[in-house]
Image: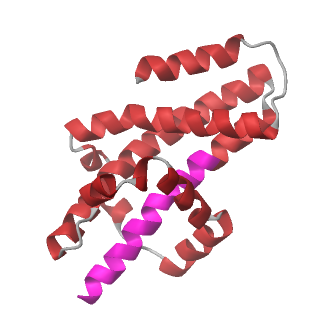
């Protein structure tokens, strides 16, 4: 997975300066985020990476503001794209939440684990996007890379916080 990510970046850097169409830029950005996040997903399966982030980070601070941000960013559309790819199978969704009270605790743990991977990928992809912008002048690609990465990272916090609010009602 790491070599795939490095190879993808190396290929982009070797292409002569040009601007890609919107569709090609969107496809490249989506694949870049998918592969970049996948690098850290492998780590999260092996180690309790969520413990590397301060526990205060996981506390819900302002639910109304969070919902507004997610509405403005169009997280529901991003969610639909995820369901068309990896999360479309019941098996993958059930690993996060099986519909039980114990499943809620597992869901919270799994999203904490995933958030570390998304934040680590966010930083890596932000650096890559800046390099692509400065060196290759890929304006649209860099913007889409940032937006997809940003929305994906914040999607997790939205769902985790929504479930935590519901869990507290039980």
Q: How many marks?
A: 0
| Residue 152 within the magenta-colored segment of the rendering | yes
Which percent across, then down, holds residue 41? Answer: 35, 39
Image-based side of 143 in relation to 150, left or right? right
| Residue depicted at 80% across the width and 12% down the height | 16
61 or 97, which lies in front?
A: 97
| Residue depicted at 55% across the width and 60% down the height | 80
Q: Is residue 59 above or below residue 126?
A: below
155 or 135, which lies in front?
A: 155
| Residue 54 visible | no
Dominant SS type (magenta): helix
Which percent across, then down, holds residue 86? Answer: 43, 47
The scheme the figure's colours follow is secondary structure
Q: Is residue 161 above or below residue 96?
A: below
| Residue 47 within the magenta-colored segment of the rendering | no
| Residue 36 visible | yes
Residue 119 sits in quarter:
top left
Which percent across, then down, holds residue 47? Answer: 21, 39
Please report the bounds of the magenta region as a residue range: 148-170
Residue 11 sits in quarter:
top right
Residue 30 sits in quarter:
top right
Image-based side of 96 in relation to 31, left or right? left
Query: Where does the C terminus fall, quadrant-wise?
Result: bottom left
Which percent across, then down, holds residue 23? Answer: 76, 39
Q: Is residue 50 above or below residue 29?
A: below
Q: Is residue 56 above or below residue 18?
A: below
Image-based side of 46 in relation to 70, left or right? left
Image-based side of 61 in relation to 29, left or right? left
Query: Where does the N terminus fall, quadrant-wise?
Result: top left
| Residue depicted at 50% across the width and 38% down the height | 34
**Which residue sits furthest left?**
102
| Residue depicted at 65% across the width and 63% down the height | 73
């Amino acid at each position: 997975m790491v070599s795939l990510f490095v190879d993808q970046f190396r290929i982009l850097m070797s292409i002569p300066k040009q601007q890609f169409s919107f569709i090609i830029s969107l496809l490249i950005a989506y694949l870049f985020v998918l592969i970049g996040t996948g690098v850290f997903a492998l780590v999260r399966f092996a180690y309790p990476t969520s413990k590397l982030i301060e526990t205060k980070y996981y506390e819900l601070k302002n639910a109304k503001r969070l919902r507004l941000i997610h509405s403005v960013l169009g997280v529901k559309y991003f969610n639909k794209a995820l369901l068309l790819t990896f999360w479309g199978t019941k098996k993958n969704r059930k690993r996060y939440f099986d519909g039980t009270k114990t499943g809620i605790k597992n869901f919270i743990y799994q999203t904490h684990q995933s958030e570390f991977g998304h934040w680590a990928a966010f930083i890596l992809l932000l650096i890559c996007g800046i390099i692509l912008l400065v060196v290759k002048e890929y304006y649209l690609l860099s913007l889409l890379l940032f937006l997809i990465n940003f929305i994906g990272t914040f999607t997790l916090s939205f769902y985790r916080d929504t479930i935590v609010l519901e869990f507290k009602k039980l």
